[in-house]
Amino acid sequence: MSIETESADLAPDGRVEKLATEFGEAITALPVYQRFEEAKTAVESDDEAQAAIEEFESIREEYMLARQTGQADQEALRELQAAQEELHDLPVMSEYLEVQSELELRLQELNEIVSEELVVDFGEKAGGCCED
């Protein structure tokens, strides 16, 4: 039975939900999505990357607190930037960020295709963002 035949048998809402599920499944089958998942797993299982992430997050948290209290200075900002550079320089993290960027671009392309049929930006509205 084809998608069109199956979809015709469903109520409009059921058909849209079925197509949305198939769309999500198709996205997860994309090579760029598969590479993203592999890169993410590599980062998650790399002890050096995890230590660098924890260090960066700790420094970022300290910096944000200092900013809120008006005590942040250029040295604190430089320390944060250095920690971020160190993190991004790790090969496993660099690969992850590159593939993440590729995936985001592909998802934006798909968003534009879906949005062509709608009056609103599908990805923006589906993401729950609010605009004034």
Image: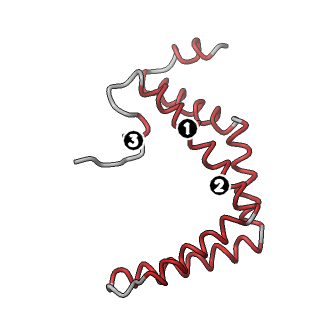
Residue at 53 percent across and 76 percent down: it is 80
Quick one: label 3 or label 2, which is nearer the N terminus? 2
Q: Position of residue 48 (x, y in %)?
A: 76, 74
Tag 1 and tag 3, C-beta contact below 8 Å: no
Circle on res. 107:
1
| Secondary element at image label 3 | helix
Could you give the CA–CA distance between mark 3 and mark 2, rounded to whole angstroms?
22 Å
Identify whether 112 is placed above or below 9.
below
| Secondary element at image label 2 | helix
Which class describes the residues within 10 Å of circle 3: few (<14), some (14-19), or many (20+)? few
Q: Mark 2 sits on what residue?
A: 97
Which class describes the residues within 10 Å of circle 2: few (<14), some (14-19), or many (20+)? some
Q: Nearer the viewer, residue 34 or 9?
A: 34
Q: Quadrant of residue 93?
A: bottom right
- Amino acid type, mark 2: Leu
Q: Quadrant of residue 28?
A: top right
Identify whether 89 is placed above or below 105.
below
Q: Residue furthest left?
A: 132
Q: Position of residue 45 (x, y in %)?
A: 77, 66
- Amino acid type, mark 1: Leu
In the image, taking residue 47 as reference, residue 68 lies left or right, namely: left
Which class describes the residues within 10 Å of circle 1: few (<14), some (14-19), or many (20+)? some
Q: Position of residue 47 (x, y in %)?
A: 77, 74
- Amino acid type, mark 3: Glu
Quick one: label 2 or label 1, which is nearer the N terminus? 2
Residue at 48 percent across and 33 percent down: it is 111
Could you give the CA–CA distance between mark 1 and mark 3, rounded to whole angstroms?
12 Å
Circle on res. 124:
3
